[in-house]
Amino acid sequence: MIGDARTRILDAAEQLFAGGGYEATPTALIARLAEVPKGLVFHYFPRKIDVLVALVDERTLVEEGREVDAVPGDPAGTLSRLARGLPLRASPAMRRILFREADTHRSVKERLGRLNSELIRRARFALELALPGARGDAARLEVAAATFAAVLLYQENLCQLTGHQIDPDAVARLIAHSLS
Amino acid sequence: MIGDARTRILDAAEQLFAGGGYEATPTALIARLAEVPKGLVFHYFPRKIDVLVALVDERTLVEEGREVDAVPGDPAGTLSRLARGLPLRASPAMRRILFREADTHRSVKERLGRLNSELIRRARFALELALPGARGDAARLEVAAATFAAVLLYQENLCQLTGHQIDPDAVARLIAHSLS
Amino acid sequence: MIGDARTRILDAAEQLFAGGGYEATPTALIARLAEVPKGLVFHYFPRKIDVLVALVDERTLVEEGREVDAVPGDPAGTLSRLARGLPLRASPAMRRILFREADTHRSVKERLGRLNSELIRRARFALELALPGARGDAARLEVAAATFAAVLLYQENLCQLTGHQIDPDAVARLIAHSLS
Amino acid sequence: MIGDARTRILDAAEQLFAGGGYEATPTALIARLAEVPKGLVFHYFPRKIDVLVALVDERTLVEEGREVDAVPGDPAGTLSRLARGLPLRASPAMRRILFREADTHRSVKERLGRLNSELIRRARFALELALPGARGDAARLEVAAATFAAVLLYQENLCQLTGHQIDPDAVARLIAHSLS
DNA sequence: CATGAATGAGTGTTCATTCAT
DNA sequence: CATGAATGAACACTCATTCAT
């Protein structure tokens, strides 16, 4: 038993929600895995949905506004560096939950939406810095940024369906080449 | 009451699964909406999951191997025409179900995976035909095809999260430009 | 498919009732095993219980009043010969049903009761013939007969609980020795 | 309302299982008779079969290894005393359940099997003590013991079929006479 | 006569939530 | 604050039986 009761409850819920989904996970099972009495779950989280909301609130962080590591004249490398990691601080389990339970509660969808927006914002900003001469062609940059964001989210989520992987670096080069 | 009982059950399930999700939809509600007695649902579909499987089997069709409408020398237009419609014959509700319930049953994930594969295959084939000089090697075509597929699936599914729309035609031009 | 529909239904029911018990056997399963449509079961047997009653009526026969193969002066051999077989014409499955479902319907209990009575009657009659001199001691003969009957029914039914077998011939000798 | 909830549930189940049988008794009826909410039955007994198992575990006791009240030289009296009561601490209802539901669950059959074994063991031991001269070989004692056990179990169970009663004392005398 | 769709009350079971202690 | 017994509505699913064709 590691950590206090509340932490153990969230640990257990994170694991179970990622594995079987929110709806299919009984609170009693969360309590058992957390090794706390059933009543204590409801002491900390009056409704079951509050467990999910707390997980998303406390264990996912969309990093907004951070500096982009852009190199002027090297859009491909700049995008590649962007692809090194989503601006999302969350465990693999929490990432799974974020995509899987987007329909379950408004707050989850909102968080995922923020991730989406931030991704596009960063890609756009990175391209603006990497291609200083292209400032005028805002529409093309926007499309390129959205495309890159779509590929990254696809990688995070849909690619598990067929096991089809996309190499983000190659996409970065493709987009960079198109904008040059 | 339109159609026979089995059809009405599937109609009701399609509507309810798309709206509230499979898990959150009681079979009793399906029966009520379909205006059939509860037992009849289980007469046709012994398990609840069989309703979902039947919906996916009978009401979604991934069009495989159809001819691609490619114009040599016009990769942008060729991709744009590809984007006019996913190779997926399914109602909006069924499309929603396909993406939402991919974790619920193997057969749903499989169908969605087939759609993914087919999308990539088509995009690759279209680009091969549109760029007869095989300009750019196979690997670049593959990346371009996967990128385009990712964007189309993103449009179908993830874009609802932020309401962020991507114009497929613009992406088509972006990719075409990159390969030229 | 052997035999007509009604026969096949009874065949299937005999097998299933013996295996899982009457209550745990759905009529639909009987129909499936018999390879007849479900409605046909109720055509021949309006109530489910009628299948059981028909089985007991038609497929068990307590042989009443048959001659006893008695040898005067040899009560042990006479009882042994009695033990060669219960006065019951029935398949092993029907025997199982007879004991197992005695509580299910009056007619089954009655049939089993008739078997019990007939067993005792035979044993008493056999002993009377085998021990002509003992006619006067009716009470002792009665006890001996009932004891032998009890052992035979125990063999047919309860012995399966511990796998404990009793050798009827040895019991026959025991009883014969006691009466001599 | 007497006793705590769990006890009342077992009380109700004991009564109902003895009356109508395990299969024919709905859990809802158990709850109603016990005057507890239906859900509480499953709080204490996750599966319906657990109620039966608990009854057998907690409310039947096969008394093993107790001293046998044997009088050397008086095998008839010794057996008679054995017949005063089965080595089974259980209410009449539980006795009924034990015999009736032997096919329902392994644990019931096992308990009944233990009773059977213990009965034979006692009868054999009693006869060994009552006949110190070891008159008659071991095999004969074994047969006599098994026969007596069969009669006692017959009395407990099968005799209800025809209402045919056997006087255990008379059987004791019969067997004793045979061994002398 | 034969059929299988139709029926609906009932079954075991689940589970979020409450609450007395 | 902590606990686990208590609650009851809801759930998926069963099944004997009916009946129109």
Image (tube, coloured by chain):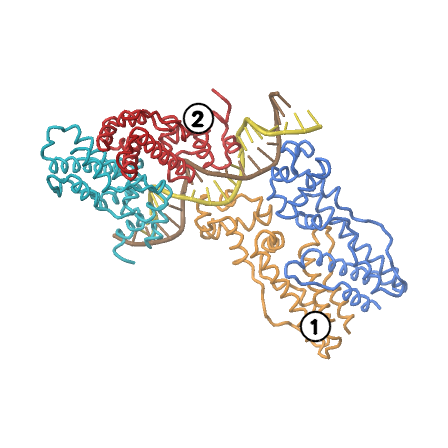
Chain colours: A cyan, B red, C blue, D orange, E yellow, F brown
Residue B121 lies left or right of residue A90; in this view the side is: right
Residue A107: % across, % down = 25, 37
The Cα–Cα distance between marks 1 and 2, rounded to whole angstroms, is: 77 Å
Residue D95: % across, % down = 61, 56
Residue A91 lies left or right of residue C168; in this view the side is: left
Residue C85 lies left or right of residue C96; in this view the side is: right
The residue under label 1 is: D127
Q: Amino acid at mark 2?
A: Asp
Q: Is residue A177 above or below residue D168?
A: above
- Where's the N terminus of chain A, which quadrant? bottom left
Q: Is residue C82 above or below residue A23?
A: below
The residue under label 2 is: B11
Residue C128 in sight from this viewpoint = yes
Q: Amino acid at mark 1?
A: Leu
Q: Residues within 10 Å of mark 2 (few under 14, many from 20)?
A: some
Q: Quadrant of residue B111?
A: top left
Q: Is residue C51 above or below residue A9?
A: above
Q: Assign a secondary structure to mark 1.
A: helix
Q: Assign a secondary structure to mark 2.
A: helix
Kindly indicate whether the residue at mark 2 contacts the one at mark 1 (C-beta within 8 angstroms): no
Q: Are marks 1 and 2 on the same chain?
A: no
Report in which chain the residue with disc 2 lies.
Answer: B
Q: Residues within 10 Å of mark 1 (few under 14, many from 20)?
A: many
Residue B163 in sight from this viewpoint = no
Count of all numbered marks drawn on residues in the image: 2
Q: Quadrant of residue B117?
A: top left
Residue B120 lies left or right of residue D176; in this view the side is: left
Relative depth, front residue between B119 and F19: B119
Report in which chain the residue with disc 1 lies.
Answer: D
Residue B156: % across, % down = 31, 30
